[in-house]
Image (tube, helix red, strand yellow):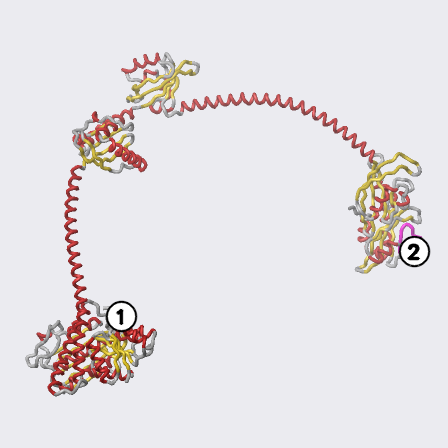
Amino acid sequence: MKRILVVEDNEKNMYLISFIIGKMGHEAIQSRTGEEGVECAARERYDLILMDIQLPGIDGMETTKRIRAGGANTDVPIVAITSYAMTGDRERLLAAGCNGYIEKPINPETIMQEISSFL
Amino acid sequence: MVSIRPHQDITGNAANGKSGIIDVTPEGKRHLELFLDAHKDQVRSVTRVDDNGIISYTVPFSQSIGQDISGQKHMREILRRHTPVVSDVFRTVQGFDAVALHVPVFRGTTFKGTLAVVIDFQSLAKRYLEVIRIGKTGYAWMISRDGTELYDPVPGFAGKSVFENVKRYPSIIPMVQEMLKGRQGVASYTFDKIGERRIAPVTKHAVYLPIHMGNTFWSIAVASSEKEMLSSLTSFRNRLILIVGILFLGGVLFSLLAAKAWLIVGEEKKRRQAEDELRSSEQRYRYLFEQNPAPMIIYQKGSLKMLAMNEAFLKHYGYSSSEALALRLPDLYPDEEKEPIARLAERLKGHAYVGEWHHLKSDGSLITIVARSHDMEYCGLGARIAVITDITEMKRMECLLRESEFRFRESMEFLPIPISISDSWERTVYVNREFTQTYGYELNDIPTVEVWAQRAYPDPDYRERVFAQWYRDVADAAKNGSATQIREYRVVCGDGGSRDVEICMRQMGDLRVTSFNDVTERRRTEEELRALNETLDQKVRERTSELEEANLRLQELDRLKSTFIASMSHELRTPLNSIIGFTGILLQELAGPLNEEQRKQLGMVKSSSRHLLELVTDIIDLSKIEAGKLIPCMESFDLSLAAREALETLRVTADRKSLQLAVETPEQLMMESDHRRVLQILVNLIGNAVKFTEKGAVTVNVREEKGAVRVSVRDSGPGIRQEDMDRLFRFFSRIVSEEGPLQEGTGLGLYLSKKMANLLGGDITAESEFGMGSVFTLTLPLRKMEAS
């Protein structure tokens, strides 16, 4: 069983993602804001981080940069969850330190494949 | 330095009779005898010596022939060096003191002995040295290099060693030593005895110098007693003093005489100068009279007869000199003036101006003149000289001037501009009618500029300012030679009313001409216009600010719209994403198994949600394009691959309808554009084709044409009616096909695709024939173009 940090502000999306992770037999650690995500990441190491990009407060990209800047998860794979990603966004995500991205709306099949590929 | 060459003629002769002398032939011997004969007062013998130093021939002492003289000092020298030598003085066997001169004899370059002459030295010395005597006691003496006295006037000294001779006079020895070194110089010595006889000490001064003669030299000294030299010098001095004294006296005398003479000459010169001056002054005055450009006459007092007249007079009046001299003064005047002028002339004394009169010229024409005259003496007679000025022309000019002034005044008078004229003392000399009419002042009312200023500018402060400005302007105008700058002043009129006046002055000679242009009406009109303009301006400003406000409101609205759409995109999509996500989970049966009906209904939920999401996404894209916020992200990619990818996304749908999907592309076609947007367009076009085609095939063709890429999507669908073609790319327009079922769609797809194609510098065109299918073609530039 792997431990996956999910940073997502929307309650329903968080439920959806956690549900799928649970179905895959892994544990989802939930973080509602970017700041909380950075704190969690500073405290302990995870096997994977799923990062919503549109967050209140600091956004997903900034959160990724902070996680990468120091703490227990500087080299842990981070997969961005983004709606309506554009070509430019994708490049910016990779530049910020993300290892991959999943587009919304979330297709259970796609997200499961993506998670498996990083674990 | 002196050098003597005794018997040069012998050597010369020797050269002439060379062959005979060399070989000592009889002819040579005779030659030598002849030579001796010719010079026997000096030359005692001539000798030929052979190259061994043996006398081969000699005259006249023939007994010496065959004698060997090679042992003699000078012989040794010449035998060795082959150069001319002079012997020391020696006592000959004949018993006289002699010197011998040997010259070498050569045949070709071979030395053949010498030729020698022997000279009686005493006779030679006597002949030359005895004459070198200075005063009574001066004398010359000579010594040879070895110290033998060759000549000395003291009897018995010659021929002896000099040191022996002078040993009693030690003061001479240093000089002798210098002489023997061959030096030249001066010396003094003293002696107090001659022979054994003591005498009073005598100081002598001597000059000595060597005489070089080839191998040897003789030194000659010339001495003179100091006393004698001094006595001669003293006598010379005394004589000199006498001469100087006489010269001095003579000089003084001469100076006195010269001074007197000079004075006399000066007087004479001055007198002559004065005479000259007088003459030239007379000349000048005559010239002044004769050549004066003004006509001048001299007439006798009393008789009034003409005595003289100048060129100018003759020329001006047309008389000849003789004609003029025959006239009397009154003859020059017309009849009515003859009597008065005669009477006047009698009374004239000293300098007088006689005013205006008339003269007759020789041709009878009348001229107006003025004349000045004064007394003078002319050739001993009492006379008057008169200078005449012809003022006829001046009078005529004056008349013309008056006329022109009148005309000027007339034109000023009727000029429609108020004008005043003042003179250089600031007195008003003229105002025209317009001035009086406009401002109510007559010339009498404003006799001076000062009075004018007081009346026109009654307020003292204002007047002060006007004056300050005015005089500045006048000074500037004078500097530039122009009129003063036109300035506006407020002038109070004669009736107490005030007017706005533009005043400008121009200096004309001594006069100042000033114009007073009344601009009161103009100013009033301008003021009204200005007020009107201001009202207009105010209205324009109000309107503008209203418009600006409206514009600001519009901008705000636009911003609100953009914000609304941006937030809507998020707010709308988040729940849709949830719906789609959870539907996906349910359909995947991750939450539990589904029955067939549930699966079917959930499929509808998912399909509707996706449709809604597409709609929302399209609307957001559109709003972005229209707001100019959609910035293409250019990159290089393979269009062939993109076309195949787009086709693949629709394969499932196509398969469901059993449609054939075909793609005709080159292996690779790299282009530069926004990959994601191109893909979006292609998916849209192919999607449309698949959607509207029930059977047959959809073919995608990719090609490059003239720097552009073209992607054609051909379908075998129902085609489009010609009248619908125009509406094809419109916003929310959907073509309703009567035959086919109403197709699901946003009505935005084609419109958005075309917009995007335009944004990327390309276009989408459609060709269709109703019932025969359609071809949609996307054209894009191969390479990125500058922002379109």
Quarter of the rendering containing residue B333: top left
Q: Decide if residue B77 is on the left or right side of residue B668.
A: right
Q: Position of residue B752 (x, y in %)?
A: 17, 73
Q: In the image, is residue B54 above or below residue A49?
A: above
Q: Position of residue B475 (x, y in %)?
A: 31, 35
Please indicate, yes or no, whether residue B682 appears anywhere in the rendered image: yes
Q: Is disc 2 placed on a helix, strand or loop?
A: loop
Q: Which residues are magenta?
A: B54-63
Q: In the image, is residue A92 above or below residue B330?
A: below
Quarter of the rendering containing residue B675: bottom left
Extreme residue in the front direction: A43
Residue placed most toward the observer, B2 or A34: A34
Mark 1 crowd level (few <14, some 14–19, many ≥20, 10 Å Cα):
some
Q: Chain of mark 1?
A: A
Q: Tell me which residue sits at (51%, 21%) in the image.
A: B275
Q: Chain of mark 2?
A: B
Amino acid of disc 2: Gln
Q: Tell me which residue sits at (8%, 77%) in the image.
A: B736
Amino acid of disc 1: Ile
Q: Which residue does the numbered mark 1 point to in the structure image?
A: A58
Q: Marks 1 and 2, Cα distance to the nearest angstrom?
A: 155 Å
Q: Which residue does the numbered mark 2 point to in the structure image?
A: B67
Q: Position of residue B560 (x, y in %)?
A: 17, 64
> Does the segment drawn in magenta span residue B701?
no
Mark 2 crowd level (few <14, some 14–19, many ≥20, 10 Å Cα):
few
Extreme residue in the left direction: B738
Q: Decide if residue B512 is on the left or right side of residue B172.
A: left
Q: Nearer the viewer, mark 1 or mark 2?
A: 1
